[in-house]
Amino acid sequence: MLSLYGENGLYELIELAKKHNWQIYDSGLDGMIDLENPEKNGFKNYQEYVEQILKNKSK
């Protein structure tokens, strides 16, 4: 198991997975990461989630 924070790390991990023919499971999304379309993965969703929490917190 690996804990990963930040978009740059995700892209490096995707390249490693492609090189070794691995799949990556994202427990935050409860699904597999799309190795061919990394922009469709969880980091953007995570950022939107954090922004939503911060907006609600400031109310």
Image: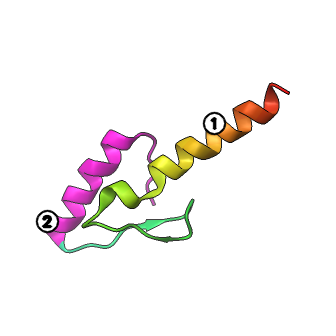
Q: Residue at x 42, y 59 (%)?
A: 41
The local secondary structure at tag 1 comes to helix
Q: CA distance from mark 2 to mark 1?
A: 34 Å
List the residue tagged with mark 1. Answer: 51
Nearer to the camera, 24 or 41: 41
Q: Mark 2 falls on what kind of element?
A: helix
In magenta stretch: residue 12: yes
Seen in the picture, residue 27 relative to 51 is either above or below; the reply is below
Q: Position of residue 48 (x, y in %)?
A: 58, 44
Which quadrant would the N terminus be assigned to in this image? bottom left
Type of amino acid under label 2: Lys
Write the residue at 34% across / 54% down: 39
41 sits to left or right of 53: left
Tell me the magenta residue range.
1-20
Residue 19 marker: 2
Q: Residue at x 24, y 65 (%)?
A: 17
Main secondary structure type of the part rendered in magenta = helix
Q: Please identify the quarter of the rendering in which residue 56 is found.
A: top right
